[in-house]
Amino acid sequence: MKKVLLTIGAMAAVLSATAQNHRIQRHHHGDAEPTVYIISVSESDTYSCPTQNCNQQDMVMKNAAVKSAIEDHKNATRDGFQQALTPSAIFADKRNTFSFAIGGDVALRAAYSFDRIVDNIDMVPYNIPMTLTPADDQEIRMDASTSRIFIRGIANTKKLGQVHIFMDVDFRGGAMGSYTPRIRSGYAQMLGFTIGRDVSTFCDLTAAPTTIDFQGPNAYNFRFATMIRYEHSFVDNHLKVGAAAEMPSVSGTYGETLMAIPQRVPDFPVYLQYSWGENRDSHIRASAVFRDMYLYNKARSSEDDLFGWGVQFSGNIHITKYLELFMNGVYGEGVTRYINDLMGSGLDFTPRPNDPTRVQATPMYGWQAAAQINILPNLFVSGGYSTVSVLKKNGTYSDSMYKQGQYIFGNVFWNLTPRFVLAAEYLYGSRKNIDGAKAHSNRINILAKYSF
């Protein structure tokens, strides 16, 4: 027990450790080498010193479990949008039957908005105000709510193979500026299954570019869901398939004739992905999602259910070590939950314009494309365009309804060390309504983030 306490006490010093050979490219499997501390789980566990002058750190790093624990946590670190680095410190038992790591980052985002203020902490074109008032003209904001803490545990078992447990928390759970903790994800993985809360299976994590703006391009679909998912890779990891049942969430326009009721059927997303390249770092993916949305029709005194569906094509292509491309395109009906700009918009369905006693799912589409240029190993620039459109069906429910949103960005990211990044970004967003009304907003972002 004394050894355990002494070892855990060293964690504070380890959290500041960084390594040298770093590549800033957005996909990272442990850019800075972590340090492993071996925890003795038995009073009889002893360590022999390999040299007469070695210290405790030498003995820890020479232990046979060190390499295994580092590889486990590097392999568990996912690439892609808003994913964390491999943590600085990993703790393992003597034989690495179990290891855990605590990591996270402290992130400060500062933004200056002009021309018009978006009514959102992120650049969401849907939330651009259509009427300009003196209070909507300009704004400066500083925000640290995206700072994050995570914990990962990995057990190497005989019956279940490798079992992963992961949970992370940020501070965006309440009203803007409240810094209320929020569980982003919390799941267990084993035998190809993911059980718990994770990024939706419909989301292609590596298809979106890196942005300071936390939500990212408006046609992307980064969101979390409680789920049961199964994934499997085959053909030497060139092909991967996945399917899930996810907790549904409906955002419709009910008017005077419709009423919300609890949902009864999960959403069912599926995908097929093909990867290539030396490290399978390029890929294209075809995805689909199917949903059954329930509501009560007061005009007919009956329950209605609507079929919603969406299809997506996405990818991430490494042209050379200096150039990387990102893209996704989505089309469907009643899938606002799977398009950033439309989440919570009430456009999954509306009463029919020509017959308000009936209901219809709303058709919509979006696409985004971006490129990243790696100027130096620790410096890149990127830029891209994204757009989302809502289509008419049986006429128009409301002339002031959202028709189209656009999102344009350009940024530069500079890693001063493997774990400390500075970045600057320009954003332009616009909104157009069915009646032709238009509005736009400009924003400049800067970011300072340290990961541990």
Image (tube, rainbow, N blue to C red):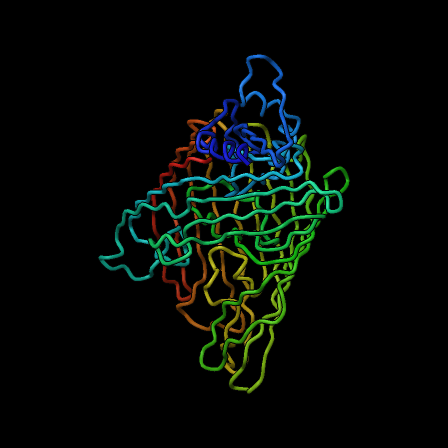
Report the side of 427 relative to 311 (left or right).
Answer: left
Where does the image place residue 300, in percent across and percent down from the top left? Answer: 55, 86
Report the side of 74 relative to 111 (left or right).
Answer: right
Q: Residue furthest front?
A: 43
Q: Is residue 434 above or below residue 206?
A: below
Q: Residue at x 50, y 22 (%)?
A: 20
Where does the image place residue 429, in percent across and percent down from the top left? Answer: 39, 50
Q: Residue furthest top?
A: 52
Report the side of 98 relative to 159 (left or right).
Answer: left
Q: Residue furthest left?
A: 134
Q: Quadrant of the N terminus?
A: top right
Where does the image place residue 369, in percent across and percent down from the top left? Answer: 53, 44
Q: Is residue 302 above or below residue 192?
A: below
Task: In this rendered view, identify the residue nearer to me: 446 or 444.
Answer: 446
Q: Is residue 8 above or below residue 143?
A: above
Task: In this rendered view, identify the residue nearer to me: 449 or 120.
Answer: 449
Task: In this rendered view, identify the residue nearer to me: 229 or 270.
Answer: 229
Residue 30, picture quadrant = top right
Where does the image place residue 217, in percent across and percent down from the top left? Answer: 47, 48
- Looking at the image, how many numbered discs can be counted on the residues? 0
Q: Residue at x 64, y 63 (%)?
A: 290
